[in-house]
Image: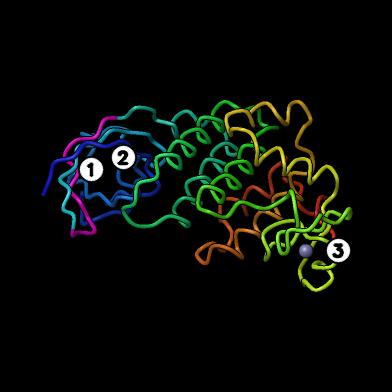
């Protein structure tokens, strides 16, 4: 057993016994960690906001390499993100970010870039104008997929590498745009609008923190269309991804008009 210090973002918690808590946190140093926090559900809790979902905190942990659960002895909040999210839309976007990490990442495998991306997305969700929230969420989803080795290919046919079709044919299964020849043989291909493709390209190529300003500038149009394509893409490439509960709720909120913006089957 070793006493370790690490920084993490709380993804979710479960009750344990009468007064304790299991805390699932994504840490910069160890990846996904499951912590046991004894007495954390007593009020007032000695952990304060540090173990609340969405909080970014520092922990002191008794780490046993061969165990699934580790005891947290101290936790100190760096940023109580959840307490700063005043409205439902921000909360739903922040939850969607946590849910995505929870679905796509498992085990104690550090990935500092992914951790920083999550922190940047939560920062964006707290301060973006409401109209930009879909851009922050979509940029996060695309960039998480990229960091995990599945970057949608938009510069050449994702199947054969030839020049892409001028009809902007995207295949979630092949993981990108296709040429006319490959698209003819690929079921499930959708036609992206010009705005949809421009938005997708921008979301993939610029830091999440900048997404805060994009929608305000009118740069990411048709977020509903992009969301559908990104979800279909994630479902094809990540077995554990079956859509996000928090995004179901988001569809009913302004910003993601998924029906109006639905991509057309090719
Ligand atoms: Zn091709």
Nearer-N-terminus badge (3/1): 1
Are the two marked residues, 1 and 2, in contact with CB atoms closer than 8 angstroms? yes
**Residue 224 percent coordinates (x, y):** 74, 48
Q: Residue at x 72, y 42 (%)?
A: 201
Task: Point out the frontmost of discs 1 and 2.
Answer: 2
The part of the image, by quadrant, that contains residue 5 is top left
Nearer-N-terminus badge (2/3): 2
Residue under numbered circle 2: 51
Position of residue 69 relative to residue 215, above or below, is below
Q: CA distance from mark 3 to mark 1?
A: 58 Å
The part of the image, by quadrant, that contains residue 187 is bottom right
Magenta stretch contains residue 67: yes
49 vs 154, left or right, is left
Ligand 1's quadrant: bottom right
Q: Residue at x 65, y 42 (%)?
A: 204
Residue under numbered circle 3: 180
Classed neighbour count for the residue bearing mark 2: other residues with Cα under 10 Å, few (<14), some (14–19), many (≥20): many
Q: Residue at x 46, y 43 (%)?
A: 114
Report whether the residue tagged 3 is closer than 8 Å to ligand 1: yes
Name the quarter where the C terminus is drawn: bottom right
Q: Which mark is residue 144?
A: none
- Range of residues picked out in magenta: 66-76
Mark 2, secondary structure of its residue: loop
Magenta stretch contains residue 255: no
Q: CA distance from mark 2 to mark 3?
A: 51 Å
Position of residue 223 relative to residue 162, above or below, is above
Residue under numbered circle 1: 40
């Amino acid at each position: 057993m070793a006493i370790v210090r690490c920084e993490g973002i709380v993804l979710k918690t479960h009750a344990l016994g009468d007064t304790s808590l299991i805390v699932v946190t994504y840490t910069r140093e160890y990846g996904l960690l499951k912590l046991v926090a004894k007495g954390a559900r007593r009020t007032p809790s000695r952990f304060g906001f540090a173990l609340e979902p969405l909080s970014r905190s520092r922990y002191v942990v008794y780490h046993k390499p061969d165990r699934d659960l580790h005891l947290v002895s101290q936790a100190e909040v760096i940023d109580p993100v959840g307490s700063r999210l005043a409205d439902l839309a921000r909360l739903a976007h922040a939850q969607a970010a946590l849910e995505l990490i929870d679905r796509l990442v498992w085990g104690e495998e550090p990935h500092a870039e992914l951790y920083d991306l999550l922190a940047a997305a939560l920062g964006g969700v707290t301060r973006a104008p409401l109209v930009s929230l879909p851009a922050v969420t979509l940029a996060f989803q695309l960039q998480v997929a990229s960091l995990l080795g599945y970057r949608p290919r938009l510069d050449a046919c994702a199947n054969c590498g030839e020049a892409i079709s001028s009809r902007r044919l995207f295949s979630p299964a092949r993981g990108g745009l296709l040429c006319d020849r490959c698209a003819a043989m690929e079921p499930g291909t959708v036609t992206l609008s010009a705005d949809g493709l421009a938005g997708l390209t921008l979301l993939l190529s610029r830091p999440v923190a900048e997404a805060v300003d994009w929608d305000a500038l009118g740069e990411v149009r048709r977020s509903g269309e992009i969301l559908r394509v990104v979800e279909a893409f994630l479902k094809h490439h990540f077995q554990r991804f079956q859509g996000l509960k928090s995004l179901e709720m988001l569809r009913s909120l302004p910003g993601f008009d998924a029906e109006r913006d639905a991509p057309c089957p090719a």
